């Protein structure tokens, strides 16, 4: 069973990676307006000038360009807005779809007692992925902006935002994706229990 499940999981990963090659860019682009809106809600310190897909060498990245909307005080120093100044940060575009590949592979690979269990798993997985997407890339970009100030003026400052970014960048998004996949399987099984055969007469 373990070997068979591992084989199914590997096939599911391969299928999802192939789909990501063809459709990953389109999915990421479709999410940019939502990510931009969330960033604007997270912190009104910055004026968003652009949020788009870009290239850094051979990597596709999501690039955020901002200007300073109001003063920022870090380490006892105040940074004043300057309409000529702008800053840009980026994160790999693949970070949008990486958690989804792990999250969806396990529900696809895990055997189900009923066919209806697969769409139930999918609903749970996509719902969880929506939340992970909102807690991932926008917060990473926001943290990168904040880190520009912290690194320059108060490098020893404790920041939950930077800790969250480091968790995600250190493998946390993979852990979240896998945990969502497990949750989808477990909840899917609980919501669609196997049918019981009638007792013999």
Image (cartoon, rainbow, N blue to C red):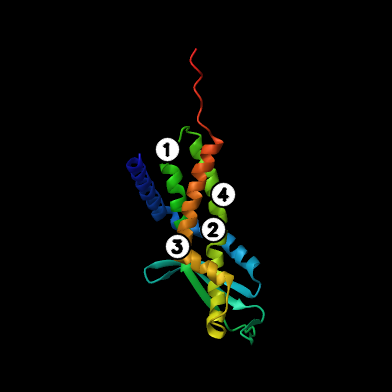
Mark 2 or mark 4, earlier in chain: 4
Q: Is residue 31 left or right of residue 42?
A: left
Q: Position of residue 166 (x, y in %)?
A: 49, 69
Look at 65% across and 75% down and name the residue there: 45
Q: Residues within 10 Å of mark 2 (few under 14, many from 20)?
A: many
Q: Earlier in the sequence, mark 2 or mark 1?
A: 1
Instruction: Residue under label 3, please give it.
Output: 171
Q: How far, Cα to Cα, is label 1 from label 4?
A: 21 Å
Q: Reading the chain from its start, which is encountered first: label 3 or label 1?
A: 1
In the displayed structure, would residue 20 be above or below residue 78?
above
Residue placed under numbered mark 2 in the picture = 133
Work out whether residue 49 or residue 45 is closer to the camera in this orientation and state it.
45
Inter-mark Cα distance, 3 to 4: 21 Å
| First reached walking from the N terminus: tag 2 or tag 3 | 2
Q: Position of residue 41 (x, y in %)?
A: 65, 66
Answer with mark 3 or mark 4, whichever residue precedes in sequence.
Answer: 4
Determine whether 179 is above or below 141 in the image: above
The residue wearing badge 1 is: 111
Is residue 120 visible to us here?
A: no
Q: Position of residue 90 (x, y in %)?
A: 49, 71
Rounded to the nearest angstrom, the CA distance separating label 2 from label 3 is: 15 Å
Relative placement, left or right, of 58 versus 79 is left
The residues bearing labels 2 and 4 have C-alpha atoms spaced at a distance of 10 Å
Q: Which residue is mark 4?
A: 127
The image position of residue 96, as x and y in percent, is 48, 59
The answer to whether the residue labelled 3 contacts the one labelled 4, judged by CB atoms less than 8 Å apart, is no
Which residue is situated farthest in the bottom direction here? 77
């Amino acid at each position: 069973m373990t070997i068979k499940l591992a084989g199914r999981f590997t096939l599911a990963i391969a299928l999802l990676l192939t789909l990501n090659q063809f459709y990953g860019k389109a999915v990421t682009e479709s999410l940019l307006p939502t990510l931009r809106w969330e960033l604007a809600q997270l912190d009104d310190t910055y004026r968003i000038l652009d949020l788009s897909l870009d290239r850094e060498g051979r990597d596709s990245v999501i690039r955020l360009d901002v200007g300073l909307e109001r003063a920022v005080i870090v380490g006892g120093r105040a940074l004043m807005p300057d309409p000529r100044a702008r800053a840009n940060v980026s994160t790999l575009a693949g970070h949008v779809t990486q958690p989804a590949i792990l999250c969806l592979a396990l529900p696809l690979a895990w055997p189900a007692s009923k066919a209806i269990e697969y769409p139930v798993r999918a609903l749970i997985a996509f719902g969880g992925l929506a939340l992970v997407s909102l807690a991932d890339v926008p917060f990473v970009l926001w943290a990168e902006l904040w880190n520009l100030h912290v690194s320059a003026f108060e490098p020893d400052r404790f920041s939950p935002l930077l800790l969250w970014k480091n968790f995600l960048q250190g493998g946390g998004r993979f852990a979240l994706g896998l945990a969502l996949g497990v949750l989808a399987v477990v909840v899917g099984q609980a919501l669609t229990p196997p049918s019981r055969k009638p007792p013999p007469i």
